[in-house]
Amino acid sequence: MIVIAPWAKKMRNDQPHPKDYPYWQEVIDGLDMPIVQVGVAGEKQLVKTFYQNVSLTRLTEIVNECQTWIAVDSFFQHFCWDLGKRGVVLWGQSDPNIFGHPENINLLRDRKYLREKQFWWWEQCDFKKDAFVDPQIVIDAVKQIINKQ
Amino acid sequence: MANNILCSISTRGRYDTTLPLAILSVINQTLKPDALVIFDDNDSPEDLRNKQHYVYLFQMLSSKGIQWSVIFGERKGQHYNHQKANTMGYKWVWRLDDDTVAEPDTLEKLYNVAIREDAGAVGGSILTPPNHTVPIQATGKIENINNEPNIQWGPIVKTQEVDHLHCSFLYRAGIVDYDLSLTRVAHREETLFTYGLKKIGYKVFVTDCVTWHLRNPQGGIRDGQLEMFEHDERIFQLKDKTIVVLDCGMGDHIVFKHVLPDINNPLVFTCYPEIIPGKSIAEAHQLLGDISQYNIYGKMDQWGWKGSLEEAFRKMYVRKK
């Protein structure tokens, strides 16, 4: 089973979050294995099983049960790193050298897409679809982790 | 820059009394600082280039090779100004009050002690004329601060180690921060700052040089209400704690978990006590007032940070010599 945490925290201006990966459906379609989603109520549901607003204890159980996980740059990538569960992080405009963990597979298309002001509000930044890697790269990274287990 | 020394003066209400004397004493030092910055905290700041006696002083500064600048302060207290000086990129900052006059050999004597590898700050005698001829019997230890006069209030006869300094001193810049949670009266700001250097392993010294403290009754930055002094005194009572304010996201708290065990005597305020136990952010506001200095993202932006978030937390809270 794979866990996905597809969305970053909703922004106050209701604009698409620059951290949110634009090709989730292609990734889900390309992975021939059970997938569960974690997040908070109100987020777009991508798969049949969506655990919303679960406690940290329950989230720990879910992560411990999974083979690996995929997330954008959010709380969840730090949470799994703390639990020692390796996964795939999808980066766009935030810098994995600052906010990521080398234990994970950090997929960044190109550093040229990183925003200049890494520590400013995300509301000050526009969404850029081109900043993200293609879905096949994500699928390959997940398979790489699972094949090593 | 010869010695990489910045002289910093924070001023308010003393344009035409003691500030010119302080500047003149900088000009007449046997060891010149590389630059002088004056932080003008006046309620109605003036362009000093339009005042003839300042024109003379600025001309003399320039002719002595001391770069000078005047920066309008935020009027939040002199600790804000000193923090700016602290982060202006100089190796050393020599801070003078705007009602002090340094004897010509003051900076040279301070510097000769400061260049020791283990020195964090060095101060001298801070004498108020006319009568100060007998050395003060004092230890300079922080635990005695309420029970003895300050050792700097009398002539210093030999270089010796202390825990803290006040008023005017030379310090190693960019190592620890001034506590910006103090009110604008900035009660104990220099004590907290120099003791902060001591806490992380640097030595703090007094040595035999003299700065005259005129204690000009008009002007000055420290006029304020009793409540401000009480607030600052409460912060001073926490001097042996490392105050941690996690006013940040859940993921940041998780990263911070890996830093917390290495922090000396932490007092933690947290948004997510289920991840990092501690007091609430509301309590942080109540105790500290302005908590913006603890914003880790603000700090990383200020530092031009390129390292990891965990390393940034370590830089902020796990400071060692």
Image (spheres, helix red, strand yellow):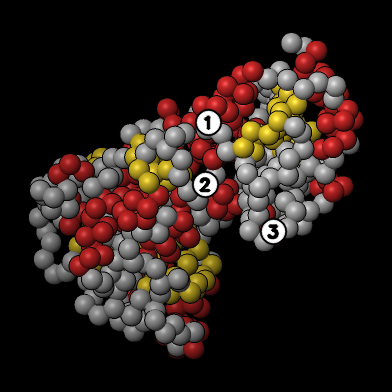
In the image, is residue A11 above or below residue B22? above
Co-location on one chain, circles 2 and 3: no
Q: Say which element carries label 2.
A: loop
In the image, A48: left or right of B62?
Answer: right
Q: Residue at x 74, y 11 (%)?
A: A149
**Marker count (numbered):** 3
Circle 2 residues within 10 Å: few <14, some 14–19, many ≥20: some
- Which quadrant holds the N terminus of chain B? bottom right
Please report whichever mark, 3 or 1, sits nearer to the chain's N-terminal start.
3
Q: Residue at x 51, y 60 (%)?
A: B34
In the image, B138: left or right of B300?
Answer: left
Would you name the residue on which mark 3 appears? A14
Circle 1 residues within 10 Å: few <14, some 14–19, many ≥20: few
Spatial separation of the CA atoms under disc 2 and disc 3? 21 Å
Q: Say which element carries label 1.
A: helix
Q: Residue at x 48, y 74 (%)?
A: B72
Please state which amino acid type lies under the numbered disc 3.
Asp
- Which quadrant holds the C terminus of chain B? top left
Q: Hey, which residue is sitting farthest top in the picture?
A: A149
Would you name the residue on which mark 1 appears? A56
Q: Chain of mark 2?
A: B
Between B45 and B263, the one lying in front of the other is B263
Between B254 and B303, the one lying in front of the other is B254
Between B288 and A75, the one lying in front of the other is A75
In the image, is residue B241 above or below residue B105? above
User: Disc 2 vs disc 1: Cβ atoms closer than 8 Å?
Assistant: no
Would you name the residue on which mark 2 appears? B248
Spatial separation of the CA atoms under disc 3 and disc 1? 26 Å
Spatial separation of the CA atoms under disc 2 and disc 1? 18 Å
In the image, B73: left or right of B12?
Answer: right
